[in-house]
Image (cartoon, helix red, strand yellow):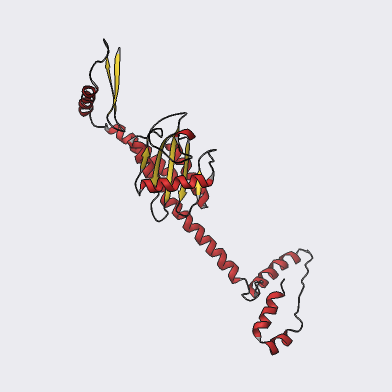
Amino acid sequence: TGAAAVRLNNDVLVVLGNPTEHLRNAPAALRELARCVNDDLDEISPSKRLGDELEVLHAVRAVITTPLSTVSETLQHVIGVATDALSCEIGVVRDGAGRRALSGSWSPPSAVLDDALDELIARADGETYCVQDSASIALPAPLRHEDGVHSVLAVPLPAPLGGILVTAHTTATPRGFTSLCRHLGEQVADAAGVVAHTAVLREDLRDLADEHFRTARTDALTGLGNRMRWEEALGAAQGRVDPGAPIAVITVDVDGLREVNEPLGPDEGHALLRRCPY
């Protein structure tokens, strides 16, 4: 017949009901009654706590057990896992170097989104930042209530990667983030920091190896292939010649190099050689 919903904090809502008549208690009395009900509740059951922890472990495992080759692929995987685990409609992750990945088809303007992420990083100040209702707490575009965003969870990514992981519920399905959601988001962000940083190191090593490969086969003066590159090309050509394929080799000589080197010096001779490939 009569009911009242009393929110004690972001995690606890107590619903009081009367089967025979409307509740006539004053708000202060209702809040005190709700507080007594809450104080009498048992602790979370072991089975519920285990289920919550298994949910967290499943999400963390999904982050760390998928082998990916590039940083962009890793970040895309991370935001996919985060939005699925938290049942969010939109999400974005940005590392300390500014690389971003977005979930689904959400694609706000890059400059606007980066400004919003910068503001969330400032608000978070190294801690988890949660807004349960964007209508009551102003958020930057494109995460405002008028942009269709209801609640936002922003979790900093750990060093040395840095950056931030942001997930949000839309006004189409207005929900908030429970303490379990925040704990799950923090664990996913910690795992993402390790996995994404590993991908960064892997890319750096791959780029360094490619650079060493090119340097070892390049003449420092002209930028052309050196003796090692010539031997490799010759071997590849021989592999085509043996089955009968035709191969052409052209040799080029620089006329007058001595006439430049002797009176003008080796620097001018080197400059001449550098111009020849072009």
Residue 247 placement (x, y as % from top left): 77, 67
**Along the horizontal axis of the image, is 84 left or right of 5?**
right
Residue shown at 69% from the left, 68% from the top: 233
Quadrant in which the N terminus appears: top left
Q: In this view of the protein, can residue 64 be seen by the observer?
A: no
| Up-down relation of residue 50 to residue 277 (above or below) | above
Asked where in the image residue 31 lies, by quadrant, the reply is top left
Residue 256 placement (x, y as % from top left): 76, 84
Residue shown at 47% from the left, 48% from the top: 94
Residue 177 placement (x, y as % from top left): 37, 35
The one of 47 and 88 positioned closer to us in this rendering: 88
Residue shown at 63% from the left, 73% from the top: 228
Count of numbered circles in the view: 0
Residue 170 placement (x, y as % from top left): 46, 32
| Up-down relation of residue 33 to residue 147 (above or below) | above
Q: In this view of the protein, can residue 159 be seen by the observer?
A: yes
The one of 243 and 113 positioned closer to us in this rendering: 113
Asked where in the image residue 178 lies, by quadrant, the reply is top left
Asked where in the image residue 50 lies, by quadrant, the reply is top left
The residue sitting at the bottom extreme is 263
Quadrant in which the C terminus appears: bottom right
The residue sitting at the top extreme is 20
The one of 65 and 117 positioned closer to us in this rendering: 117
